[in-house]
Image: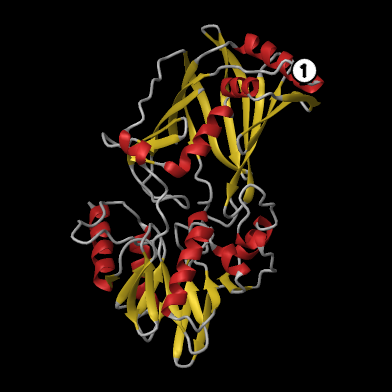
Amino acid sequence: MGRKSLSFALFFGLLLGLCLSTRAQEAKTVLQSATKAMGDVKSIQYSGSGQLGILGQAFTPGGPGSKSAKEEMTLVEPTPIRKGGGGPFAGEQKQVNLVSGQYAWNQPGSAPQPAVAAADERQLQIWLTPHGFLKAAMENNATAKKGNGGTVVSFTDGKFKVNGTIDAQGMVTRTESWLANPVLGDMPVETAYSGYKDFNGVKFPTMIVQKEGGSPVLNLTVSDVRTNADLALTVPDNVKAAKIPPVNVTNQKLADGVWFLAGGTHNSVLVEFPNYAVMIESPLNDARATGIMAEAKKLIPEKPIKYLINTHDHFDHAGGVRYWVAEGATIITQEMNKPFYEQAWKAPRTLEPDHLAQSPKKATLITFKDKYVLSDGGRELDIYRIAGDIHNAVMSMVYLPKEKILVEADDFTPPPPNASLPGPRSHAGTVLLYQDLQQMKLDVATIAPLHGNVVPFSALQQAASTEVSSASK
């Protein structure tokens, strides 16, 4: 359950041409009427409570002028353990996201953190709000046509196309647009507004429901609305100077023919076989996949990547899988993931065509239920589904028995060197992972996590015992 408040200020110079088409003239008339009915504001702040969903983190595959915004969220989790999504937490977490023009940043404390890649989407979210939509549509020479539930007004702002439905009372009841997503392609973003109420002369919905790719990400009940508050955001200097960092891939040799590929927020593992190689995990997107492919070619230039092993369907771990399809690799994943991937990969990718869209190729998948083994030339690689995993229903891990190396995702993220262990309840999956390994009697010496640094098995033992001890107090 979360409480979410958002305020934004929009200042537009309306530069409309003198010669408007019939559809454009109709749109202008509808927008002017809607602005009069809803209230013309320079900024609006609303707050309420409801539920937030995290896109691409479902427990089961496919489950559920000056332009500025400040979004403050206080997330309240009443229970310390939950299935799916990010790591469990107890108590409250505060999150502040900001955007001003082309700049985006987060403010977790006093130090601003640049969020360069988030700027476009945060700007789009302004246009998807009722009053933001009216402002942007007037600025961008919108057109209009009759549709279900009223008049559908459409405009294009940069690379985004935005549609909005305005009913007979002049209320914006729905907005939609599309964002590029590595897994879902041209992903629809749909927001429904209902229960309009008068807040000191301004009409605003009391119910906001947003879906991304068909999955609910926001269900908010609005309790308070304030208009024309000052939102003069000053962009911090470090945010102005920030650029999207280039992909950095480093390698660490774990054993003969086994390399840990790191250098970012997500890791992969390269395993050499006599006549081919296997890549374990391709996270994030094509850019990361391109980087780890380049590193693999440096390490073993004469051998193709025959297999790509995918641990689970969460978008940050599956965003680069399509790249390997285009490269001719066979994808190995748990059987429940196959229908989700096959359906998701059918979606068009016109906003940001990826490697597979540019070089179409039919995907070859090998699926398994509980275990799959690759064995060749004296090397064995075992893939297990982690039974009872609380982060993902079909989470898989990879074990190299000869080298005693375990590759796992999300259940255990070691802290940086010389840092203390994660706090109590940081991730109950750590305890369950340790217990599973004990029950399976796997002889593990090294943990190669897909987040964090390579650590000895004793680090997992210590983290699990710390969490068990803290939970029992």
At label 1, the amino acid type is: Glu
* Residue in the picture at 44% in, 57% down: 390
How packed is label 1: few (under 14 Cα within 10 Å), some, or many (20 or more)? some
Q: Nearer the viewer, residue 334 or 129?
A: 129
**Of residues 20 and 469, the one drawn nearer to the viewer in this rendering:** 20
| Side of 5 relative to 30 (left or right) | left
Which residue in the rendered view is the most extreme toward the bottom? 377
**Is residue 18 in view from this perspective?**
yes
Quadrant in which residue 262 is drawn: bottom left
Taking 96 as reference, is 383 above or below it? below
Query: In this picture, is 125 found above or below 88?
Result: above
x, y percentage for residue 326? 62, 68
For label 1, the residue is: 26
Percent of width and height locating residue 119: 47, 38
Q: Residue at x 53, y 13 (%)?
A: 41
Outermost residue toward the top?
A: 201
Please give the name of the residue rendered at 36% of the width and 77% of the height, measured from the top-left corner: 405
Is any part of residue 436 visible from this angle? no
Q: Is residue 408 above or below residue 52?
A: below
| Quarter of the N terminus within the rendering | top left
Outermost residue, left direction? 418
Q: Nearer the viewer, residue 83 or 341?
A: 341
Residue 165: which quarter of the image? Answer: top right
Q: Position of residue 34 (x, y in %)?
A: 67, 14
Residue 104 placement, left or right of 208? left
